[in-house]
Image (cartoon, rainbow, N blue to C red):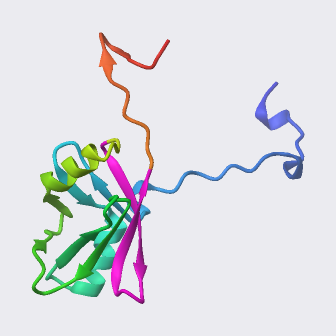
C-alpha cells in the first residue's frame, strides 16, 4: 500500500503538536559547571528592557525554589550578551538543598515587582554513560 492510495479522515486522527523550542522559552539554568545560563527568549527580553547594560540584583527564597532578577544599575550581576555568568555558590546551594543539577527555572516578567521571577522545575538527573550504555537502560 502506498500513501497516495490510502483514504483517511483527518478528523478521526490525533493531531500532534511539536514541543516548544528550548530557545523560545523563558528559562534560567543552573549548570554543573557552576554557571547560571539565561535562555534565549529571556536574553531577548532583557535586551528590550535593559538595552546594553544588563545589571541585575539576584534574589532567591530560602528553599531556592523561586528566584528573581531585578534590574538594578548598582546590581552585583552584570550579564554578558551570551547570558552566562559563573555563580558556583548558588549552584552548590542548590546541590546542598538536594536539587538535581542541571536545575531549570521557568521565568516570567512580574509587573508588580518589575523583575523576572523564576520557579524551579523538578527535572530528572541526566543518565550517566557506563561502557557506552546509559546507566538507567536495562
Residue at the spot x=74%, y=50% of the render? 15
The magenta stretch spans which residues?
A: 101-121
Is residue 26 positioned above or below 124 on the image?
Answer: below
Instruction: Pick the residue in front: 41 or 137.
Output: 137
**Residue sitting at x 14%, y 60%:** 85
Total count of labels: 0
Where is 20 relative to 117, above or below?
Answer: above
Seen in the picture, residue 88 relative to 48 is either above or below; the reply is above
Camera-nearest residue between 120 and 17 = 120
Task: Please state if 74 lies on the left or on the right of 13 as rendered.
Answer: left
Would you identify the image quadrant in which residue 78 lies? Answer: bottom left
Horizontal arrangement in the rendering, residue 84 relative to residue 67 (left or right): left
Residue under the point 22% across and 51% down: 93
- Expressed as whole percent of the image width and height from the top left, the position of residue 131 reads 29, 10
In the picture, the quarter occupied by the N terminus is top right
Determine the main secondary structure of the stretch shown in magenta: strand
Residue in the foreground of this view, choosing between 38 and 34: 34
- The spot of residue 24 in percent (x, y) is 42, 63
- Residue at the spot x=33%, y=78% of the render? 45
Residue 133 part of the magenta-drawn span? no
Amino acid at each position: 500500500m502506498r500513501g497516495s492510495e490510502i483514504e483517511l479522515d483527518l478528523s478521526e486522527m490525533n493531531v500532534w503538536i511539536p514541543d516548544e523550542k528550548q530557545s523560545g522559552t523563558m528559562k534560567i539554568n543552573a549548570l554543573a559547571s557552576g554557571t547560571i545560563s539565561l535562555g534565549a527568549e529571556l536574553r531577548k527580553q532583557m535586551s528590550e528592557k535593559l538595552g546594553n547594560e544588563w545589571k541585575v540584583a539576584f534574589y532567591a527564597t530560602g528553599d531556592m525554589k523561586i528566584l528573581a532578577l531585578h534590574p538594578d544599575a548598582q546590581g552585583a550581576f552584570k550579564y554578558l550578551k551570551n547570558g552566562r555568568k559563573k555563580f558556583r555558590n548558588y549552584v552548590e546551594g542548590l546541590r546542598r538543598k538536594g536539587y538535581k543539577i542541571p536545575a531549570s527555572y521557568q521565568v516570567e516578567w512580574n509587573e508588580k515587582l518589575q523583575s523576572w521571577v523564576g520557579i524551579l522545575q523538578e527535572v530528572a538527573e541526566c543518565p550517566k554513560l557506563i561502557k557506552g550504555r546509559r546507566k538507567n537502560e536495562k
